[in-house]
């Protein structure tokens, strides 16, 4: 699961103007899925979400593909700002 967190950080930090403020945490859920909580600065939120949610959709797809190659678990991604 640590590898998945590092991969998500790599993806999101590459998009953000303030990459030092990006935090990614993972949690386990009851339905055997992994929950990734991505926290970015409020100025970077629009960039991470993208127009019509296309960027976050692409990020979720890449994270799920990475998980399938390594752990084969479902991943739920939540994005929030501070």
Image (cartoon, grey):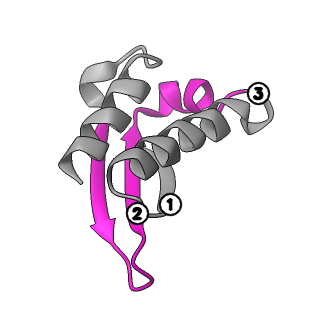
Residue 65 image offset from top left, x and y in percent: 50, 43
Image position of 51 with respect to 38: above or below: above
Circle nearer the N terminus (2, 3):
2
Does the image show residue 36? Answer: yes
Distance (Cα) linking label 1 and label 3:
20 Å
Count neighbours of disc 1 (C-alpha within 10 A) and say few if under 14, some if 14 to 19, many if 20 or more: some
Residue shown at 29% from the left, 58% from the top: 26
Count neighbours of disc 2 (C-alpha within 10 A) and say few if under 14, some if 14 to 19, many if 20 or more: some
Q: Disc 2 on helix, strand or loop?
A: strand
The residues colored magenta run 23-50
Image position of 19 with respect to 56: above or below: above
Distance (Cα) linking label 2 and label 3:
24 Å
- Judging depth in this view, the residue of 42 and 37 nearest the camera is 37
Residue shown at 28% from the left, 29% from the top: 21
For mark 3, what is the residue? 51
Distance (Cα) linking label 1 and label 2:
5 Å
The answer to whether mark 1 and mark 2 are in CB contact below 8 A is yes
Q: Residue furthest right?
A: 52
Quadrant that contains the C terminus: top left
Does the image show residue 82? Answer: no
Q: Disc 1 on helix, strand or loop?
A: strand
For mark 2, what is the residue? 35
Disc assigned to residue 61: none
Q: In which quarter of the image is residue 27?
A: bottom left
């Amino acid at each position: 699961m640590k590898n998945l967190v590092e991969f998500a950080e790599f993806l999101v930090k590459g998009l953000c103007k303030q990459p030092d403020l990006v935090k990614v945490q993972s949690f386990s859920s009851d339905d055997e899925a992994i929950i990734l909580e991505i926290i970015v600065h409020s100025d970077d939120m629009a960039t991470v979400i993208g127009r019509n949610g296309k960027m976050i959709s692409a990020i979720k797809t890449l994270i799920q593909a990475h998980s399938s190659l390594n752990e084969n678990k479902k991943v739920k991604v939540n994005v929030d700002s501070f």
